[in-house]
Amino acid sequence: MLERILRTLLLFTLTLVTLVNGYFVTPTSAQDQSEYKVDFSGVSAPIPVNIRTGPSTSAAIIDRLSPNTRVQFSGWTRGTSLTDYWTSASDNRWFFYEKNGVKYYVASAFINGNPPEIDQNNPFVSYQVTITTNIPALRQAYEKAIRNWNNTGIVLLTPSQNAPITLGEGYARGYDGFGWWQSNGSRVTGGTVIQWNRVSNRNAAYLEALATHEIGHVIRLNHRSDYSIMNNSWLTRITGPTQNDINELRNIYSR
Ligand SMILES: [Zn+2]
């Protein structure tokens, strides 16, 4: 009985803390939630394979792949570890594809095929950046945004001190955020400002999307009207670059 009361009290305290912080932090946010955007395909195991709403066996099943189906994936992440259908090795990778901004996940353990290695040590272009804001939610958003772009394998943004590219807060010309780049010969400068008083009540996902969008401008991406983090109308539904953004980056930077 006492244990139950304590547990209720703990749950209440945790709820209170997360409410005070402004958004609900799910227990899984403690693990590495990096997402890698890369095109690849695979063939499902010779049994029906579940398609889920998240990279976990507790996520809802929304569809099922017929045996031996070729699937085109657009990225992968980590989640529940499962035993590989063919090798019996443990595998915590989950592959996803996207439809209308929604991700559908399939356990890698039931897919024959692997994403190509993203080599973050060999990007097409690299920039040093300095996060200049001290607002925790904004710093976090910028850190996630940096990871989002680095996970494409095309650009590498390295946090450092006094870099010519600054990621900060301030007046954003009437928008939630503003990002720019400028080149003077080979020297590229640029930066972002996010106007905190316009977005302080927005959730972490929106701030991540906004920061990713503004950094997109810094790495020379323009607005788009299709499925893209550079399309303002997608900012409330996705948080990172899409295949369209990755293709555009490749157009700009491929050697
Ligand atoms: Zn913009």
Image (cartoon, grey):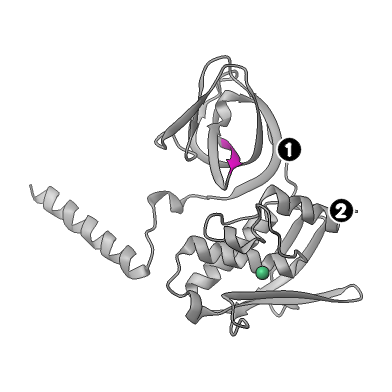
Q: Judging from the image, what secondary structure is the residue with disc 2 in?
A: loop
The answer to if 119 sits in the magenta stretch is no
Answer left or right for 96 relative to 122: left
Q: Judging from the image, what secondary structure is the residue with disc 1 in?
A: loop
Crowding at dot 2, Cα within 10 Å, few <14 / some 14-19 / many 20+, comes out as: few
Which corner quadrant of the image does residue 133 belong to? Answer: bottom right
Q: Amino acid at mark 1?
A: Pro
Find ligand 1 in the image and state its quadrant: bottom right
The answer to if 98 sits in the magenta stretch is yes
Crowding at dot 1, Cα within 10 Å, few <14 / some 14-19 / many 20+, comes out as: few
Label 1 vs label 2, nearer the camera? 2
- Cβ of mark 2 under 8 Å from ligand 1: the answer is no
Q: Residue furthest top?
A: 46
Residue beneath the point at 61% across and 81% down: 172
**Where is 31 relative to 206, above or below?**
above
Question: Mark on residue 188?
Answer: none
Question: Mark on residue 254?
Answer: 2
**How many labels, in total?**
2
Residue 183 visible in the snapshot: yes
Q: Amino acid at mark 2?
A: Ser
- Asked if the residue under mark 2 is in contact with the one under mark 1, i.e. CB atoms within 8 Å, the reply is no
Q: Position of residue 244 (x, y in %)?
A: 72, 50
Q: Which residues are magenta?
A: 94-99
Q: Nearer the viewer, residue 120 or 21?
A: 21
Residue beneath the point at 79% across and 77% down: 189
Residue beneath the point at 59% across and 82% down: 174
Q: Position of residue 149 (x, y in %)?
A: 68, 58
**Where is 76 relative to 32, above or below?**
above
Q: Position of residue 135 (x, y in %)?
A: 50, 77
Label 1 sits on residue: 116
Q: Nearer the viewer, residue 245 or 16?
A: 245
Q: Position of residue 97 (x, y in %)?
A: 61, 38
